[in-house]
Amino acid sequence: MKTNLLRAVLLAAVIFTLNSCSSDASEASSVEAKSLVVANYNYSVSEVETMQLINDYRVSIGLNSLEKINYISVESEGHNNYMITNNVVNHNGFVNRSENIIKTLGAKTVSENIAYNYSSPQAALNAWLSSPGHKENIVGNYTHFGISIRENTETGKKYYTNIFAKI
């Protein structure tokens, strides 16, 4: 009787231990999966130039340059399309965009700059740097970013959405 009870307890302990280990491995895999999110995004010359200008500015004041993440640029593009379709310039839906980036990429913080009707990346950056809130995002404690610049084909005006994230 004691032998059967001992075998049952030992078997239960082994099963519990195996389940605990597999649970930890699943959590580690989900963290790795978050960093491996793949999104395709074709950057325009203006978008690449804007990202380079932002990084050049950050480095010039002693900050790290930011790494681009296509997924964040896709989120930025979605917001530009929303603004063009609805003929508005705003941050509507930012909470949803930031929560999505936090959930999908494991970001700790997210912020966003938008601009409208600037003819060049340098003009948009100058405007952002002249605005305390926008500048705070550019010089913030971030590690990654994404950008989208879209033109309204009816008006010819450009919409900029730039999202920053600390991952």
Image: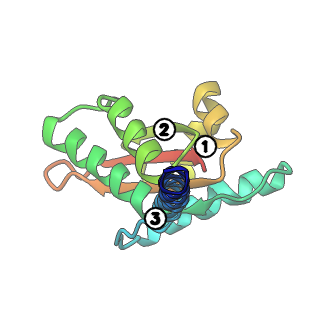
The residue at the point 53 percent across, 62 percent down is: 25
Q: Is residue 54 left or right of residue 77?
A: right
How is colour applied across the structure in the image? rainbow
Amino acid type of the residue tagged 1 in the rendering: Asn
Pinpoint residue 166: horizontal percent, then vertical percent. 62, 46
In terms of secondary structure, where does tag 3 sit?
Answer: helix
Task: Give the number of the disc on residue 44.
Answer: none
Task: Give the number of the disc on residue 112.
Answer: 2
In terms of secondary structure, where does tag 2 sit?
Answer: strand
Question: Which badge, 2 or 3, comes first in the chain's sequence?
Answer: 3
Q: Residues within 10 Å of mark 2 (few under 14, many from 20)?
A: many
Pinpoint residue 137: horizontal percent, then vertical percent. 61, 36
Q: Which residue is mark 1?
A: 126
Q: Are marks 3 and 1 in contact (CB under 8 Å)?
A: no
The answer to whether residue 77 is seen in the rendering is: yes
Q: Are marks 2 and 3 in contact (CB under 8 Å)?
A: no
Q: CA distance from mark 2 to mark 1?
A: 16 Å
The residue at the point 15 percent across, 35 percent down is: 86
Q: CA distance from mark 3 to mark 1?
A: 37 Å
Residue 123 versus residue 59 in the image, above or below: above
Seen as rendered, the residue at the extreme front is: 1
Amino acid type of the residue tagged 3 in the rendering: Ala
Amino acid type of the residue tagged 2 in the rendering: Glu
